[in-house]
Image (tube, helix red, strand yellow):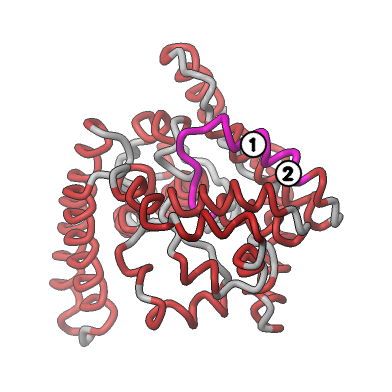
Amino acid sequence: MKTLSLLATLLICCNLPAQDYLSCQRVFSRVDGDVFANDLPAAMQRIDSIYDAYDFIYARHCIKSLQICCKANDSLRAEKWLSRCFTQGVPVWVIRNNELMKKSFSFQNTLAVIGNYDSLHAIYERSYDHELRAELDSLIELDQARTKKVNEVFIPFRPGVYFRWKQNNKRQAERIREIIQEHGYPGERLIGLPQTIVDSAVNYKYLVRYGPNLGETSAYYMLIHYYSTPREDMNELLMKSLVLGYLPPEFYATWNDFMARYGRKKEGHLYYNQWHDDLETALHREAIDRRRHAIGLNTLEEKERNRSVLSERRKAGSSNSEVVLE
């Protein structure tokens, strides 16, 4: 109930505008059901409600929308979502090499959008904070180097390396907290997509195996490492970023799962079953679903269905020819 009351208080106190990204996330979760039912007209009606209502739409949701339009052979809608993909930073190579989206290159009415790629991409480049982007790149590079040492060091030397890793986690979390307080959570909306996505040679194998599920994860992984040991939460601070579209709800849910698993029991952190599962899920299932719904996530049943489908796609090598799922 703590999350529900925190969210209710935030909505009242902040007098938030119509761009509630929890509602946006719920729409895309419902679109999954339409896709499984092969009801593409219903899916397109839902994504129509998103297109003009939000200044910022996550790249993965733009991709998902374009995939659906291409699958339905709806060239007019595909034209709109192709343009939105470009203004949200999706590289041309990702669209050209996806089995569904590449159809947008064969529609007559999308040729002008493709020809205008540089101008549309320039809109994306102006939309995020390049200075913070560079800082987060530097922070995650240090995080990954320290984490690699922890994983590879000989056992006799591990305590010292582990201690320095924890100290670094604390320093980086404190810096992330400062950024959130000043600007919002440093995710895709604030710092754009990783610079590495422009390199098709590096990323093509990932695209084929997992599909075009683009996102920004630097602060996400740093906070996972931070919450791998008992730490004070920053949920109240994060909730505003969540509602305003700076923070994907699955990130918030994952950190709370880590706090529930590794935090101090007296603090009473609760599971969302996004990364770690409640050991008594069967008993707490309804409560977990309420917490998930409160931050825009799909139900446990839908999450489990999607994960099973994604696993089967990877085994079959079909991830790059199917609509991405939540």
Q: Amino acid at mark 1?
A: His
Q: Residue at x 22, y 31 (%)?
A: 182
Answer left or right for 153 relative to 209.
Answer: left
Q: Quadrant of the C terminus?
A: bottom right
Task: Determine whether the residue tagged by mark 2 lies in a helix, strand or loop.
Answer: helix
Q: Amino acid at mark 2?
A: Arg
Query: Would you call the spot at circle 1 few (<14 residues within 10 Å), some (14-19), or many (20 or more)?
Result: some
Q: Residue at x 80, y 51 (%)?
A: 40
Q: Residue at x 69, y 75 (%)?
A: 313
Judge depth for marks 2 and 1 and give the one in front: 2
The residue at which mark 2 appears reads as 30
Q: Are marks 2 and 1 in contact (CB under 8 Å)?
A: no
Q: Quadrant of the N terminus?
A: top right
Could you tell me residue 202's position as x and y percent?
38, 81
Could you tell me residue 46's position as x and y percent?
72, 39
Prevalent SS, magenta region? helix
The front one of 47 and 269 is 47
Could you tell me residue 55's position as x and y percent?
46, 34
Numbered label attached to residue 293:
1
Instruction: Examine the rendering and report whether any part of residue 307 can be seen.
Output: yes
Answer left or right for 173 relative to 100.
Answer: left
In the image, residue 265 above or below residue 8? below
Distance in Å between CA atoms under marks 2 and 1: 12 Å
Task: Determine whether the residue tagged by mark 1 lies in a helix, strand or loop.
Answer: helix
User: Which portion, as a residue range, is magenta?
Assistant: 43-60
Could you tell me residue 86's position as x and y percent?
46, 54
